[in-house]
Image (cartoon, rainbow, N blue to C red):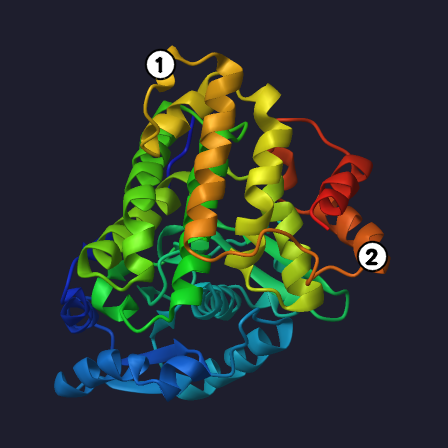
Amino acid sequence: MANRFVLNETSYHGKGAIKEIATEVKARGFKKCFVCSDPDLIKFGVRKKVTDILEESAIDYELYSEIKANPTVENVKTGVEAFKSSSADCIVAIGGGSSMDTAKAIGIIIENPEFGDVVSLEGVAPTKNKCVPIIAVPTTAGTAAEVTINYVITDTEKNRKMVCVDVHDIPVVAVVDPDMMSSMPKGLTAATGMDALTHAIEGYITLGAWEMSDMFHLKAIEIISKSLRGAVENTPEGREGMALGQYIAGMGFSNVGLGIVHSMAHPLGAVYDTPHGVANAIILPTVMEYNAPATGEKYRNIAKAMGVEGVDEMTIEEARKSAIDAVKQLSTDVGIPADLKDIVKPEDVDFLSQSAYDDACRPGNPRETSVEEIKQLYLSLM
């Protein structure tokens, strides 16, 4: 079987990288940019860092900001109509996963109008055309949506998140500038950072993993483990490390899949609007314990990448525990809640469990599972 890898055409990394946005727009012959950015980034002046560059380079643009933290089908439909009215020929997506996911869905529908209902994009939709060219500028160090073929949209009618996987949606250019992330508050930095760690760990143990993806995921685990505490304290080294680490994790998991940490986190965002990174961070250690018997020696390598000493002398059970403990400690150090008691309502557990089982990430989990076992995992976190 052939293993496929899909990455950006071009990516820029490091302080000041956003200056290259104008270079790419002009080099590719684009005339007008459709700028997708959420209201908070506009309010706090983060979006302006990019639009100032467009203005200085005499590049025309139109702003679209009707984007929720967990973007909805309606956000996408409104965005499609706004794009049609804008006369734009490219999209500049500024933000976290919300802005970039919305941009991907808009771009896909513009070039594949038969999917205009949005909900038909769920799973692996048979789109035929590449989406409108996207230049993605992350402002959080977590989702890595700038380098993935995935996006997630909330279907509010059914109270569920739709995971969409499409090689046609990957941004043509990623601009990963740690300065764009420096205004993130501590809580958001912690949550998105733990989201990135979850990507790296789940991508490393998923059923689709292989040598090339393992290389990315282990390096990402190492960088994130070294950098996240500093990023939460807003150190330049921490910010730079997280900007790179989350991108490397995205290079891997986008191509091999994830597991039930994400499957269980997605319904929490749909039902309670829980930040995705917080949900992942709370669930990750518990699911790692559950998956441990199906992971061979991989937790030993995770523990090493996280800086645990003496791992080679440990039994496999000790090595697995040390990896899980290292994740728990990092989560505690950056202020992530320990359980779901303040999030999940007992009467919703059956719905959440079925939604998690039906989620597109679940088949990649290294251990076979069931609705009942997922229910028990939720209950154990309450």
- Secondary element at image label 1: helix
Q: Position of residue 130 (x, y in %)?
A: 42, 57
Q: Position of residue 168 (x, y in %)?
A: 44, 53
Residue 259 visible to the viewer: no
| Mark with earlier residue (1, 2) | 1
Q: Position of residue 309 (x, y in %)?
A: 32, 24
How many neighbours does mark 1 have within 10 angstroms: few (below 14), some (14-19), or many (20 or more)?
few
Numbered circle sitting on residue 312: 1
Q: Nearest the camera: 353 or 65?
A: 353
Residue 53 vs 184, above or below: the answer is below
Residue holding disc 2 = 346
User: Of the residues shown, which amino acid type is indicated by label 1?
Assistant: Asp
- Secondary element at image label 2: helix
Numbered circle sitting on residue 221: none
Q: Are marks 1 and 2 in contact (CB under 8 Å)?
A: no
User: Of the residues shown, which amino acid type is indicated by label 2?
Assistant: Pro
Q: Nearest the camera: 275 or 124?
A: 275
- Identity of the residue drawn at 42% across and 21% down: 300
Mark 1 to mark 2 CA distance (whole Å): 42 Å
- Identity of the residue drawn at 50% across and 33% down: 324
Residue 202 vs 163, above or below: the answer is above
How many neighbours does mark 2 have within 10 angstroms: few (below 14), some (14-19), or many (20 or more)?
few
Residue 196 visible to the viewer: yes
Say left or right for 179 vs 34: left
- Identity of the residue drawn at 42% across and 45% down: 330
